[in-house]
Image (cartoon, coloured by chain):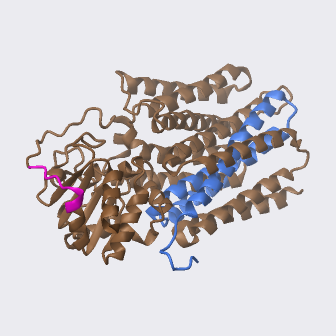
Amino acid sequence: MSTEILFIFLLAMFLGIELISKVPSQLHTPLMSGSNAISGITIVGAILAAGTSSDSLRIILGTLAVAFAAINVFGGYIVTDRMLGMFKKKQGEVQK
Amino acid sequence: MSITFINLVYILAALLFALGIKMLSSPDTARKGNFISALGMLIAIIVTLLYSGLDYKWIIVGGVAGAIIGTLAAKLVKMTQMPEMVALFNGFGGIASLLVGWSEFHMYVQPTSAAPSTVSLITIFLAVLIGGITFSGSLVAWGKLAEILNSKPWLFPGQKIINALLFAGILAAGALLVINPVGNYPVFIGIVVVSIILGVLSVVPIGGADMPVVIALLNSYSGLAACAAGFVIDNNLLIVAGALVGASGIILTNIMCKAMNRSLANVLFSGFGATTRSSKKVEGEVKPISVDDAYLILEAAGSVVIVPGYGMAVAQAQHVVRELGELLEANGTEVSYAVHPVAGRMPGHMNVLLAEANVPYEQLVEPQDVNPKMELIDVAIVIGANDVVNPDARDDNNSPLYGMPIIEVDRAKTTFVLKRSMAAGFAGVDNPLFFGTNTRMLFGDAKASITGLVSEFKG
């Protein structure tokens, strides 16, 4: 690991704070469930752990990690979509 | 597939995540934003599967199982249960990071492996620590929200000392691990166990009313856990995505604390609601009103503000409330819904419940928008809200609620409070609003009362 990766972390935190402070409070629940989905990105590490080893403990740990992360990815995005689909404008106005 | 190509795709995925969150800044674009974020995830997963030499068998087993469980959960969950679902998913994010960290550690201690660097060991330690605390803390939060566990704060003597000792112990164990990883597998297992215990102990002293803060904080931890896993496997995409989630959770935690006028330390350690009591005795007379009389006042009202609290969702009254709102509008009344940030059991929860009941989002307003024109409002209808409309938060500096921003319905021309009985709110504090001169109490089940009003309007 180089210091570069710490640099990326700090910039990403800064970007996150800038972007998320613009999310209105009425969308905070979808923001949180959408965040659950994004935190499922651990699936990338989990895939590498489950697929690159012949050691049985690593396979078990990796497979479990893939399963938990996949729950977050699928569950998070689908439930967020379900919620956002409910946010409607007044009847008669066309949704953009 | 070349590593350069894979890394380029990861950059694209990170951009799509950021763009997706940016589009959450308006309800008009939010759904598309979620789709773009999902697209980022899809390409990240596909390109990871292209790494050479992967054995797909177990990836498919885990992936398919997770996909089925996640999809079913997302389709079946009720909107009132969103806090439970988010709490549980925070925990799953944590455990996934813990497992990835463990798997890396296991690889390093094999005799055939090259000696791991100090930095690798520190990051593994962090992934396990943050992941473990997030996992078990989230399970406790979930249990409290689902009312499987007692939602009251659980305090016992020496609690803080025990937590501090455990934390010091886990740091010492981490140091031991970094110095000599190969001979210290039991120490590693100890770290896993203690981090899980720490997660439990840090959430049990927090009461049910403070869960919105806790799940926002755990949301942040789950992002930081993904970040730590990213440091472990040296992957920029995990770090960027984890940092975005971490930042989101921090901001939401901050908003929730401000909305309750409490510091994060106060939420985490004080066991609010267990001890505090207002010293002041509320004076005045409670003036009940019947559904018939309430109808006559509403029929003549030019503007109505509805203040929903979680009690409205418990009574499943949001659909009849929306119907009442539509009838009022048809009668020429201006209708809005004032939603306090801590209404409901998680940030933004009440907005989702109202959206589910087809309330157009333009009618939802925040306290700072409605308070300045409160004197012009003919009728404020408080449904299942209590502490967020307590004038003591503004007037009585001895009140435990003092300083919390409220929706100042006591300044409206008339205020209806729908309530089952005169019981105190979550915080266990009396509410002088109920004794106010402009206040009329509409006692009974909120849903039945609103249904009564709706049929009067139709009748």
| Residue sitting at x 91%, y 45% | B53
Residue B402 or residue B433, whichever sits in front: B433
| Residue sitting at x 48%, y 37% | B146
Q: Colour of chain B?
A: brown
**Image position of B301 (left or right of B319):** left
| Residue sitting at x 37%, y 52% | B312
Give residue B402's position: percent from left, percent from top. 22, 50
**Quick check: can you spot residue B409?**
no
Give residue B118's position: percent from left, percent from top. 68, 36
Indicate the quadrant containing the C terminus of chain B: top left, top right, bottom left or bottom right: bottom left
Give residue B339's position: percent from left, percent from top. 36, 60
**Image position of B31 (left or right of A49):** left
- What stretch of residues is rendered in magenta? B285-293
Q: How many marks?
A: 0
| Chain drawn blue in the picture | A
| Vertical position of residue B416 compared to residue A45: above or below | below
